Image (cartoon, rainbow, N blue to C red):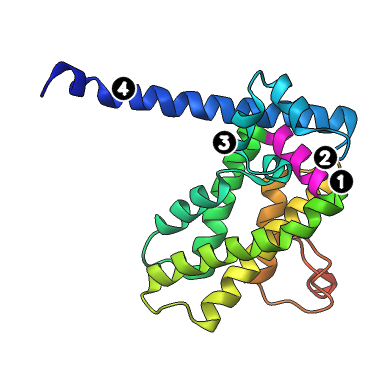
Amino acid sequence: MTSSSAKQPPRTGRRERQKARTRHSIQEQALRLFLSKGYQATTVEEIASAADVSHMTFFRYFPTKEAVVETDDYDPMLVELIRSRPAGEDSLTALHRAVLQGLSTVYATDREALLTRTQLILNTPALQARMGQNLQATERLFAEVLAGRTGTGVTLEIRVLAAAAVAALTTAIRHWAADGGTADLPTLIDRAFDVLHRPHDSATLGQPAGQPGPVERAK
């Protein structure tokens, strides 16, 4: 091995870290401008200038202005967490625990950015229109990784579980963002998945997880 080839991996690592820093800087400046000026009024040129990159550099990282808000690393992270759950764990529990672990990490390290991005999507028609496509892509990823765990292929049942998991996750995040991020997001995600786990009727649906419904309280 020559000295130049021996140094190749560290250089690659530094390059990837620099790319990640640039991408994060662009997103950070974009969110700051969207909050101060409004999404529609902010231009790509202004975002690039604030991040100290060229107009063309912006498009190397994000193909559109919408992508600055939409792009994240959450799906690959969640897929890996689902894949790493114990083999004997049922599919819904694997989804629940993997999603809770992943979003708890995001909440602890990137709470403000997640809140800002979610509120922008909820309040910007151009972003809402694209949200459905992104959620469908997440459902497909969840279904594929579940099929890999079970070895059964992507069945109707697996598709339903994947769709339910995405619905539970996104509903919890929307509820959290609509309330200004005042609640604890991991707790809301836990409650949302608990609805999928437990038997329920009209008397229990209004009760958070762990709290008895009116029938249980009367006993």
**Callout 2 secondary element:** loop
Magenta segment, which residues?
A: 111-121
The residue type indicated by label 1 comes to Asp
The CA distance from mark 1 to mark 4 is 44 Å
The residue type indicated by label 3 comes to Arg
Instruction: Compare residues 55 and 181 and report the one nearer the observer.
Output: 55
Task: Tell me residue 155's x, y (percent).
Answer: 49, 81
* Residue, disc 3: 60
Q: Is residue 197 left or right of residue 12?
A: right
The residue type indicated by label 2 comes to Thr
User: Looking at the image, is mark 3 or mark 1 earlier in the sequence?
Assistant: 3
The CA distance from mark 3 to mark 4 is 23 Å
**Closer mark to the observer between disc 3 and disc 1:** 3
| Residues at marks 3 and 2 touching, judged by CB atoms closer than 8 Å | no
User: Looking at the image, is mark 3 or mark 2 earlier in the sequence?
Assistant: 3
* Residue, disc 1: 179
Q: Quadrant of residue 12?
A: top left
User: Looking at the image, is mark 1 or mark 4 earlier in the sequence?
Assistant: 4
Instruction: Compare residues 161 and 127 and report the one nearer the observer.
Output: 127
**Closer mark to the observer between disc 3 and disc 4:** 3
* Residue, disc 2: 182
* Residue, disc 4: 10
The residue type indicated by label 4 comes to Pro
The CA distance from mark 3 to mark 1 is 35 Å
User: Looking at the image, is mark 2 or mark 4 earlier in the sequence?
Assistant: 4
Q: Residue at x 57, y 36 (%)?
A: 60
The CA distance from mark 1 to mark 2 is 6 Å
| Residues at marks 1 and 2 touching, judged by CB atoms closer than 8 Å | yes
**Circle 2: is it few (<14), some (14-19), or many (20+) Cα within 10 Å?**
few
Task: Tell me residue 64's x, y (percent).
Answer: 69, 43
Task: Tell me residue 62's x, y (percent).
Answer: 62, 40
